[in-house]
Image: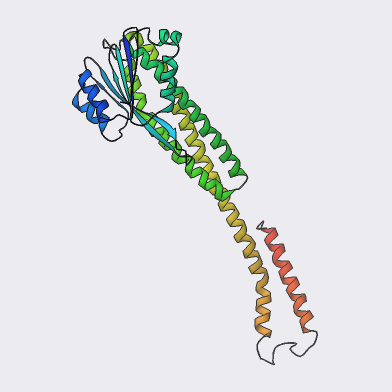
Amino acid sequence: MAIKIKTYNNISWVNIVEPTAEDLQYLKSNYKFHPLDFKDVTGESQRSKIDIYPSYAFIILRFPITYKDSHLIGSHELDIFLGKDYLVIVQKKKLKALDQYFYKVANHHKLQQEVFSSKAALVLYYILKELYGSTLSLVDWLLKDINEAEIEVYEEQTKKAVRVLASLRRNLLTFKSIVDPERLVIKTLAHLDKEYCGQELANYFDDILDDIEKIYNILLNGKEIIDGLHETNETLTSYRLNRVMRILTIFSVSLLPLTLFTGLYGMNVSSLPLIHDERLIWYIFGVLAVVIGGIFVWLKKKDII
């Protein structure tokens, strides 16, 4: 079984990673959880939520992770059963930060005294404090990427900037969709008045709620920055395109007289003016120089170039 249990001061923390049928049978044999909760544990991933029962609460929380083969953000789900003297956490996929904290608590007596000093809800508080602390490091990583994207935009690295901005926008929206519903879950915990989670712990979960709100507001600000950078990049791209089109137009207009004269004197017609004069080519070049110069002066006067 992938079950680790730490018991101290008559409070048990049960940590289950990637549960098997045997692990679920252990839970069914030792705890009287609602069948629908077991269905959620074994079913597909869900949004964060909380179901409140007289003797326990069932909580689903999601925490962001980064995939090794890309810069994209995903999430891992934690299914939590909170009772008065027990805390059961089921990790559908291994969450490294949680496992590290479990072994840290298990191997430090003083930390156990602090974490297990009250109800199991206090243990949950310390766990969430640790996990949201790890989440903040991921937020910092995103902010660093946003700063790098800003540099790329203003250095006019158009192709790279478009790709980076698209990836960042996806990550921010994914991150925001993970954090947003958790605000209501933690707010519900902070105001829960049950034997297993009374008002004496309200301030603790309000502290967690403050962390979540901080993360959420940073993500909102990040999204606004990305949207602004996207608009700036589009504006710069349009400006560069207009500049190229303007230069091409100037060349086209400048060469138009030459095209006209070439077309006229390239015809096999003997009645054209000065057609038999050997100095004709110099006359043509002179007239073209005056015309092209006049075109450039007019474009400059109109502030087109």
- Between 252 and 155, the residue placed more toward the observer is 155
One can see residue 219 in this view: yes
Q: Position of residue 233 (x, y in %)?
A: 55, 46
The quadrant where residue 284 appears: bottom right
Q: Quadrant of the C terminus?
A: bottom right
Number of numbered discs visible in the structure rendering? 0
Residue 280 place in picture, x, y as percent = 77, 84
Q: Can you say which quadrant of the picture contains the N terminus?
A: top left
Q: How is the image coloured?
A: rainbow
x, y percent for residue 191: 31, 15
Would residue 212 be seen by someone viewing this image from the given angle? no
Q: Is residue 233 left or right of residue 84?
A: right
Residue in front for this viewpoint, 81 or 176: 81
- Identity of the residue drawn at 65% across and 88% down: 267
- Against 253, is 80 above or below? above
Q: In the current view of this chain or complex, which residue is farthest to the right? A: 279
Residue 110, x across and y down, in percent: 45, 8
Residue 77 is drawn in which quadrant? top left
Residue at the extreme bottom of the image, as rendered: 270
Q: Is residue 267 left or right of residue 97?
A: right
Q: Residue furthest front?
A: 1
What residue appears at the point 47 percent right and 38 percent down from the top-left corner?
68
Q: Is residue 186 left or right of residue 242?
A: left
222 to 297, vertically: above or below: above
Q: Residue at x 69, y 58 (%)?
A: 301
Closest to the observer: 196 or 117? 117
Q: Is residue 75 above or below residue 194?
A: below
Give the quarter of the image for residue 150: top right
